[in-house]
């Protein structure tokens, strides 16, 4: 069980990382968030708004989008992006477990499995208010281009892209696993990135 200091450290990690949306809820993952939305900082109060479309700052977003599209030309990087699009517990276990040398399962590593569930559920709460406020179009919508996971596009059209839930989940888990296995921190943080 996490002590109070560890819970505040987790809150700090979530704030630094940025955002989230739909990790656990009360679905098959059954995570129990360490914090309610009301106990977490409200990102609307400190996260800058996304740049307006066609603004000077938006040019940086466009450049990043084009960089990301070029990354898809690498078969391995495209496969990783497809795996990462599956937002949830299974992806986290499959991507980070091998780096630390563990086959993470509910039966074999129950404490770690529960920790991952609960941290993931906590990730869901931190950026919901900011996502709802900004309802930022996803790049595939703005550019009217397909994604690598077309079967997710319909659902993603109803969910803002900023702040990024995938980013907060990936970074939070990279930081969590780095704390659990500091000897593999470089590899874990590289994977989180």
Image (cartoon, helix red, strand yellow):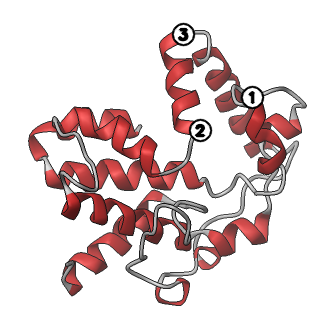
In the rendered image, residue 118, in percent from the top left (x then y), is placed at 37, 69
Point out the tag, 2 or 1, that comes first from the N-terminus.
2
Q: Residues within 10 Å of mark 3 (few under 14, many from 20)?
A: few
In the rendered image, residue 69, in percent from the top left (x then y), is placed at 67, 20
Which quadrant of the figure has residue 90?
top left
Identify the disc placed on residue 85: 2
Is mark 2 in CB contact (under 8 Å) with mark 1? yes
Instruction: Report the side of 79 relative to 142 (left or right).
Output: left
Is residue 15 in sight in this rendering? Answer: no
Residue for badge 3: 74
Residue for badge 1: 147
Instruction: Report the side of 88 relative to 147 (left or right).
Output: left
Is mark 3 in CB contact (under 8 Å) with mark 2? no
In the rendered image, residue 64, in percent from the top left (x then y), is placed at 64, 31
Determine the residue positioned at 63% across, 58% down: 163
Point out the tag, 3 or 1, that comes first from the N-terminus.
3
């Amino acid at each position: 069980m996490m002590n109070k200091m560890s819970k505040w450290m987790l809150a700090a990690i979530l704030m630094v990382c940025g955002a989230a949306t739909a990790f656990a809820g009360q679905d098959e993952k059954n995570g129990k968030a360490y914090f309610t939305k009301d106990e977490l900082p409200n990102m609307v109060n400190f996260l800058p708004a996304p740049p307006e479309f066609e603004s000077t700052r938006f040019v940086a977003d466009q450049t990043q989008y084009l960089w990301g599209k070029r990354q898809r030309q690498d078969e391995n990087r495209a496969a990783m992006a497809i795996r990462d699009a599956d937002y949830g517990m299974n992806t986290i276990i499959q991507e980070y477990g091998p780096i630390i040398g563990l086959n993470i399962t509910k039966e074999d590593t129950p404490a770690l499995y529960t920790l991952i569930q609960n941290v993931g559920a906590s990730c869901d709460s931190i950026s919901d208010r900011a996502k709802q406020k900004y309802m930022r179009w996803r790049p595939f919508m703005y550019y009217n281009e397909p994604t690598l996971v077309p079967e997710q596009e319909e659902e993603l059209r109803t969910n803002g892209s900023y702040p990024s839930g995938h980013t907060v989940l990936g970074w939070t888990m990279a930081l969590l696993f780095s704390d659990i296995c500091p000897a593999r921190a470089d590899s874990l943080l590289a994977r989180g990135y």
